[in-house]
Image (cartoon, rainbow, N blue to C red):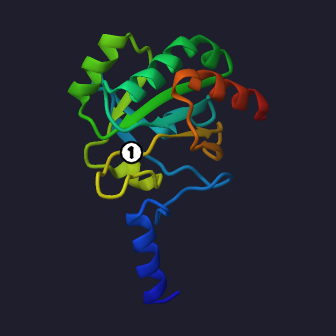
């Protein structure tokens, strides 16, 4: 694929219609490590062979849609854990911002700080121009394979969306 293809993809990416590094179901999940709101270093590899991962990306701490989504996952936390999955949130905010957000809304799961956007870019969920993460949830199995990608996130009942899909997966 030549220069014209790269130019066309660049234009589509700027318009928000394509992402150069977009992930796909059935692919190996990109490895990552980042600090959570408590300063703990979390790696995707920590969960391989142990539990499934609900990796949810969101634009910004303490904004209406992001708060609704986080609180929905908080409310469904026990049921998601019972489905043998851990929840990890990711945004470009700092660990300090995540700590305040998690404390304010009593979030029982880790939120990973990605201010340099390495994870956001690796998963192809970076919003063009703004650089925030697109609201996307990725379900990763115990072997590190992406089983489901939710791009049409319903913030107010995201826990139910996630649970239904977890129950349908092997």
In percent of width and height, residue 69 lies at 47, 25
| Residue for point 42% across, 65% down | 13
Could you say whether the residue bearing mark 1 is in a helix, strand or loop? Answer: loop
Instruction: Using the rendered image of the protein, determine whether residue 90 is visible from the camera's viewpoint.
Output: yes
Q: Quadrant of residue 90?
A: top left
| Residue for point 31% across, 41% down | 114
In percent of width and height, residue 85 lies at 61, 25
Q: Considering depth in this image, is 128 or 86 the residue closer to the camera?
A: 128
Instruction: Using the rendered image of the protein, determine whether residue 38 is visible from the camera's viewpoint.
Output: no
Q: Considering depth in this image, is 143 or 59 the residue closer to the camera?
A: 59
| Residue for point 70% across, 29% down | 166
Give the total number of marks visible in the rendering.
Answer: 1
| Residue for point 38% across, 52% down | 127
Q: Quadrant of residue 91?
A: top left
Q: Give the labeled residue for mark 1.
A: 133
In the picture as drawn, the residue positioned furthest to the left comes out as 96
Relative height, residue 16 to residue 36 (above, below): below
Relative height, residue 7 to residue 111 (above, below): below
Q: Horizontal placement of 61 versus 138: left or right?
A: left
Q: Quadrant of residue 150?
A: top right
Relative height, residue 77 to residue 17 (above, below): above
Relative height, residue 93 to residue 99 (above, below): below
Looking at the rendering, in which quadrant would you find the C terminus?
top right
In percent of width and height, residue 65 lies at 42, 28
Mark 1 nearby-residue class (10 Å; few <14, some 14–19, many ≥20): many
In percent of width and height, residue 39 lies at 27, 26
């Amino acid at each position: 694929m030549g220069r014209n293809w790269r130019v066309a993809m660049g234009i589509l990416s700027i318009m928000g219609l394509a992402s150069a590094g977009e992930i796909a179901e059935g692919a190996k999940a990109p490895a990552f490590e980042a600090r959570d709101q408590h300063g703990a270093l979390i790696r995707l590899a920590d969960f391989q062979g142990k539990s499934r991962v609900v990796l949810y990306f969101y634009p910004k701490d303490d904004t209406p849609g992001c708060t609704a989504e986080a609180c929905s996952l908080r409310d469904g936390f026990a049921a998601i854990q019972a489905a043998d999955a851990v929840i990890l949130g990711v945004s470009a905010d700092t660990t300090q911002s995540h700590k305040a957000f998690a404390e304010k809304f009593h979030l029982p799961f880790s939120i990973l700080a990605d201010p340099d956007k390495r994870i956001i870019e690796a998963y192809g969920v970076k919003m063009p121009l703004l650089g925030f993460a697109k609201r996307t949830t990725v379900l990763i199995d115990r072997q590190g394979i992406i089983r489901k990608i939710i791009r049409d996130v319903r913030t107010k009942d995201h826990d139910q969306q996630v649970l239904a899909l977890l129950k349908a997966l092997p």
